[in-house]
Image (spheres, rainbow, N blue to C red):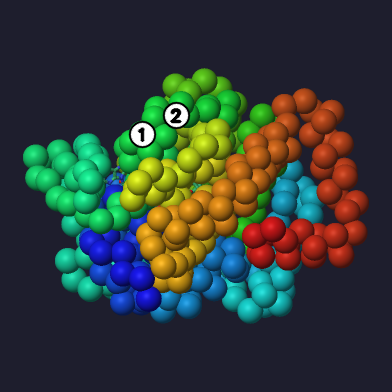
Amino acid sequence: MHDPGRVVIVGGGIGGLTLALALHRAGIASTVYEQHTLQADGSFQRRATGFTLWSYAIARLIDLGVNVERTGNPIETTEIRNQSGDLIAIMPVGDASRKLGAPSYEIRRGDLLAAILAELPEHTLKTGRACTAIREHADSVELEFEDGERTRADLVVGADGIRSIVREHVAGEIPLRYSGYSGASGVTRFTHRDLAPHTHVDVWGRGGKAGIADVGEEKIRWYLTWKGSEESQKSLDEILSRLEKWYSPVHAVVQTTPQTAIVQHAYYDIAPLQEWKRGNVVLLGDAAHATTPFAAMGANMAIEDAAELAALLCKASSTAEALKNFENSRKNRTEEIVKHGRRMSRLTQLHSPIAAWLRDQAFTHMPEQEMEKVALAMAAGE
Ligand SMILES: Cc1cc2nc3c(=O)[nH]c(=O)nc-3n(C[C@H](O)[C@H](O)[C@H](O)COP(=O)(O)OP(=O)(O)OC[C@H]3O[C@@H](n4cnc5c(N)ncnc54)[C@H](O)[C@@H]3O)c2cc1C
C-alpha cells in the first residue's frame, strides 16, 4: 500500500472528518484543522442544523463504523405538499432504501460530527485553527494559521467548504453564484398531530419552498427559502407573516423555534472547476463542488468524495496517481449534481401561479410506480 506521508485536512465538517476516519480505518494518520471551536452540540456551525443523508451515503458511514443510529432518524416517507398543505405526492423512501440495503436518514449535523469524532484517535482534530495561507515547496506543503503557527505536510486536503481558502490556492479566485434564493433553518423540539414520525415533508410553494423533517429525539429540522437579494435577511415576524397561509405545521414550527436558534442563509453554488488539485493539494466536498441545497446532495457528495479519496490513496502507487484518479472519478458525477440542484431550485419554487399549478397537477397524477422510481433514484444518488 502506498504511504501518502503526513496528511493534513483543512476543515472539520462532514467531508473532512469522514476523510480522516476513512484514512484511519486504512491505517493512515491525519490531522484535521478546523477554524471554529467545538460547540456543546458537537457542531462547528455554531447553531443547530441538519440534512438528509440518502442510503448510498449512510452505507459509507456504516462501513466506516459510524453509529448513525445516534445521529438522527431513518426516513420512511417523503410527502410533497403544496403551499396550502394539499398532498401532491408520496415518495416511499423507506422501501427504496431497504432495497439498497441501508436506510436514508434525517441527520442532526452536530450529532453526526460527534459520532465520527468518537471513532477517531484523540488529537486528530485541532479546533480554533483557521488556515490563512498555503505554500508549496519542493518537498512539502506549508500551511499557516491565523495564530501564526505553521505546519508542513506531504498531502493537503481542502475540505473547508464553500468559501474555501484551499480552493483559492488550487484554482484561483472562483466567484460564488447566487441562486436568487435566501432562507432560514432551525432544529427545535416540536410535535404536531399532522406530522407522522419518520417523515420528511417538502412544501413546494410559489417563489419559495419549505421542509420539515423528524430528526428524532422529538426534534424537527425545518428550512424555508424565499426569492430575493443576497442581503434579504428577514426578521422572525416577517418570516411568520409570509407563512401565514402556508401548511400550518410550517408556521407552527418556526414560531416554536427560539429566535437565537434560527440560522439565515443565502444559497450559492460554484461553476465547475477546471482542476481539483495542484501538486499535492486537493479539494473535496463543497470546496470542490458547492451546490445549492435544493438537490439535498451536498453532504452526501462530501461523504462519497471522502470515502473514494481514501480508497484511491490506498490503491494507487503514488499520491499524484491517486489525486488524478480521484479527480477523474468524481468530477462528472458532482458536476451533474450541481446542475440537478439548479433544476430542482426552479421546479420546487416556481413563481408563476399557473406554472406551479401545472407542476402540482403533474405530480398529483404521477403513477405510484413512478414515485417509487424517483425514491429509488434519490436513495441511490442517481
Ligand atoms: C440549509 C441547508 C440545507 C442543506 N440540506 C442538505 C441536505 O438535505 N442534504 C445534503 O446532502 N446536503 C445539504 N446541504 C449541504 C451540506 O450542508 C453541505 O454540502 C455539506 O455540509 C458540505 O460538507 P463539507 O464538509 O464539504 O463542508 P462544510 O460542512 O461547510 O465544512 C467545512 C468546514 O471547514 C471549516 N473551515 C472553513 N474555512 C476554514 C479555514 N480557513 N481553516 C480551517 N477550517 C475552515 C468550516 O468551519 C467547516 O467546519 C444543506 C445546506 C444548507 C445550508
Residue at screen point 71% across, 71% down: 96
- Asked if 247 appears above or below 16 in the picture, the reply is above
Return the residue at label 1: 168
Q: Quadrant of residue 294?
A: top right
Q: How many marks overall?
A: 2
Circles 1 and 2 in contact, beta carbons < 8 Å: yes
In depth, the one of 282 and 292 nearer the eye is: 282
Residue at screen point 14% across, 50% down: 151
Q: Position of residue 380 (x, y in %)?
A: 66, 65
Say if residue 237 shows up in the picture.
no
- Asked if 375 appears above or below 327 in the picture, the reply is below
In depth, the one of 45 and 175 nearer the eye is: 175
Circle 1: residue type: Glu
Taking the image as shown, residue 295 lies to the left or right of residue 280, namely right
Residue at screen point 66% across, 64% down: 379
Return the residue at label 2: 174
